[in-house]
Image (cartoon, grey):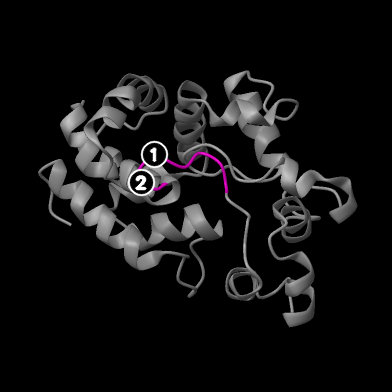
């Protein structure tokens, strides 16, 4: 469906990394119906954004106080940001508490089920859901999501499960980005990293010989 050269261009990664990911992604995408050039371009562009070119398969929660106020403004004020700064586990447990199937802050679920895989799968409920789809014990062993083979499977299953093939068919870059990042399309909010997502999608489409 595509070569390592196209993969490297679409996700913006070094050639050696593209070679490592090519076969796992091809297999996973085929199983989940991500089989047209347009679907592949949208999928790979979003993976490139979420994982920094397939280099970051685990969410980095080591934030400074000022960055906490920028990224998680609904969870921190200047005083609490100073208390949590530089403590990834405490940060994860706070910002992801009581959402996506996680328990409260003291449960430890927030950090345990932090973003992993090329799509940064987050939350106990999502680990359970994708694990059931793939027949993998992701809820019990969340670190499995950082592997290349499993990561590719998770990314493709999540994409299809969220209905993103349909949005890709419509060439709806904003809709794809909103659904992936915000979980919905019926909003005026721009997804995090929108400018980068749009630019990456344009480049990925070009790598497959398609117009943006």
User: Could you tell which of marks 2 and 1 lies nearer the N-terminus?
Assistant: 2
Residue 2 visible in image: no
Which residues are drawn in magenta? 52-59
Q: SS at mark 2?
A: helix
Q: Check if mark 2's residue and mark 1's residue have beta carbons within 8 Å.
A: yes
* Total numbered labels: 2
Residue position marked by numbered label 1 in the rendering = 54
Q: Quadrant of residue 209?
A: top left
Residue position marked by numbered label 2 in the rendering = 48
Residue 166 visible in image: yes
190 sits left or right of 14 in the view = right
Measuring from the top left, give residue 61's x and y in whole percent: 63, 54
How crowded is the residue under tag 2: few (<14 C-alpha within 10 Å), some, or many (20+)?
many
Residue plotted at (49% across, 30% down): 151
Which residue occupies the foreground of this view, 63 or 104? 63
Residue plotted at (29% across, 40% down): 39
Measuring from the top left, give residue 167's x and y in whole percent: 37, 51
Q: How far separated are the C-alphas under marks 2 and 1?
A: 6 Å
């Amino acid at each position: 469906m595509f070569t390592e050269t196209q993969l490297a261009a679409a996700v913006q990664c070094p050639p050696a990394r593209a070679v490592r990911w090519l076969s796992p992604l091809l297999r996973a995408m085929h199983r989940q119906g991500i089989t047209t050039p347009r679907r592949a371009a949208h999928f790979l562009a979003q993976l490139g954004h979420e994982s920094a070119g397939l280099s970051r398969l685990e969410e980095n929660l080591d934030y400074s106080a000022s960055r906490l106020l920028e990224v998680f403004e609904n969870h921190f004020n200047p005083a609490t940001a100073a208390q949590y700064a530089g403590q990834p586990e405490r940060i994860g447990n706070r910002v992801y508490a009581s959402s996506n199937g996680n328990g409260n802050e003291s449960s430890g679920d927030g950090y345990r089920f932090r973003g992993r895989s090329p799509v940064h799968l987050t939350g106990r409920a999502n680990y359970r859901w994708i694990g059931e789809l793939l027949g993998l014990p992701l809820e019990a062993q969340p670190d499995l999501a950082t592997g290349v083979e499993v990561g590719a499977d998770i990314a493709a299953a999540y994409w299809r499960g969220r209905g993103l093939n349909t949005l890709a068919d419509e060439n709806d870059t904003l809709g794809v980005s909103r659904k992936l990042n915000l979980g919905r399309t019926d909003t005026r909010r721009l997804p995090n990293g929108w400018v980068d997502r749009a630019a990456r999608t344009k480049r990925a489409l070009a790598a497959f010989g398609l117009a943006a």
